[in-house]
Image (tube, grey):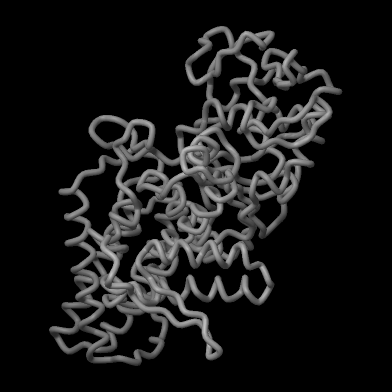
Amino acid sequence: MAIYITNTATGKKEELKTIEPGVVKMYVCGPTVYNYIHVGNARPAVVFDAFRRFLEYRGYKVIMVQNFTDIDDKIINEANEWGVDFKDVADTFIAEYWRDAQNLGIRAANFHPRTTDYVNEIIEAVNKLISKGYAYVADNGDVYFSVRKFEKYGELSGKKIEELISGARVEVSSLKKDQLDFALWKAVKPGEPSWESPWGCGRPGWHIECSVMSQKLLGDTFDIHAGGEDLIFPHHEDEKAQSEALTDKPFAKYWMHNGMIITRGDKMSKSIGNVFLVREAVKRYGKEALKLFLLSKHYRTPIEFSDNILLDNKKAATKVIKSLNRFEEKYPYPLVPKRDHYMVEMEQKFIEALEDDFNTPKAIALIFDLAKELNKSMDEGKDEEALKRYHLIARVFGNVLGIFEGGSKLKEETNEDKIIEEILKVRQEFRKEKNYTAADKIRDALVRSNVKILDTPEGTKWEKNTEVNE
């Protein structure tokens, strides 16, 4: 059967028809790395990791790109406050992102480009937009995209140019020819990092980075562009405009956007100050509960974040974990069950739910039903029936959604040892490549988390540093 997704550009549910048969090329907007990620940041990471897993389960080869914005006003401000180079701030919070991603069981994308690695390509793209008449250089060396020259501006967000108000998520500047225009290149200010360009020293604007990195890694036109709905305007609208102005080709075939996490009536946001960090949520509620929460509503709908709601998800997760534990205690080495009509029917129900605009609530309901049936089968001594239900939860459905993967994993909910071991494996790979700067960033991040690192002739050893107070 076909997979259907809601395309933000049309507002309609559409059949997924990839540009290249059997291959999905997908770009997901990643974090600006100036602080720890919060639960709102985690929703697109969890949702689109699960969507990618489902596509792979359905037989697609997925090429996924998720960027790190590592040069930005917020990063520069943080660096100035710390008295360090902006790269130190970015490297620190990229390392911390990976720790949180590991905590949540979010897999790495195929590519994680950084903005600062693509500055030359960004300058080339800006220059081309100027030569095509879509951009202009301001008196101070800023370069702006001329919105009114791109006739399809507003096509993604549904906004009309004549209705847009300057200052409503649009930066106001006396240097612009039109207040709706947006920056492609920002002239250097005192004390800021900068790169040489034909218009003087400066740095990339926010929107142009994603256009350049996605097109360099996925091509001028790719299948899916995804992110939070707060990015639809102006970020994704601006990306679409400048990309299509550059290439004269469609940018992304489908646009997918997840709803916001709502706290105290507002979207969860560092600027508002109503954030709950991922690592705090995992520590309080557990990985499975947090992921259940993030997948329990349809990805396009907002979710209210509260302690009571998360505790309810923790109770629900615990019930499933106990069911899996009960089976694993009796069968520590469960075999693969023979596929029969029941298993085929359950898998088909699961597939049909996710093929219908990635309906994770319906798919998760199947997992809860299976957990109840697992307990019932165990009570009745129907071990073969229990094995089928265990297999579907732990090895099939759980692996697709990234929850209850491989079994109960109850120990991992209260033990960070495996997480630390995985992080140290990444550090060891950097050391083998003689990338000591990256390795040291990981070491420093662990040390700040009260983990003592010792590099010995026998290898890297570590222990929890109980002498340091949190």
Q: Is residue 56 above or below residue 153?
A: below
- Image side of residue 374 versus residue 105, left or right: left
The answer to which quarter of the image holds residue 451 is bottom left
Q: Identify the residue at image location x=30%, y=91%.
A: 332
Viewer-nearest residue: 394 or 447: 447
- Image side of residue 40 versus residue 6, left or right: left
Viewer-nearest residue: 272 or 386: 272
Image spot of residue 383 (x, y percent): 24, 89
Viewer-nearest residue: 246 or 433: 433
The answer to which quarter of the image holds residue 112 is bottom right
The answer to which quarter of the image holds residue 377 is bottom left
Q: Identify the residue at image location x=42%, y=82%.
A: 339
Image spot of residue 87 (x, y percent): 59, 48
Examine the rendering and report whether any part of residue 423 can be seen. yes
Dividing the image into 4 quarters, which one contains the C terminus? Answer: bottom left
- Image side of residue 366 versus residue 11, left or right: left
Image spot of residue 2 (x, y percent): 54, 53
Examine the rendering and report whether any part of residue 342 can be seen. no
Q: Identify the residue at image location x=61%, y=50%.
A: 26
Image spot of residue 210 (x, y percent): 64, 40
Viewer-nearest residue: 272 or 310: 272
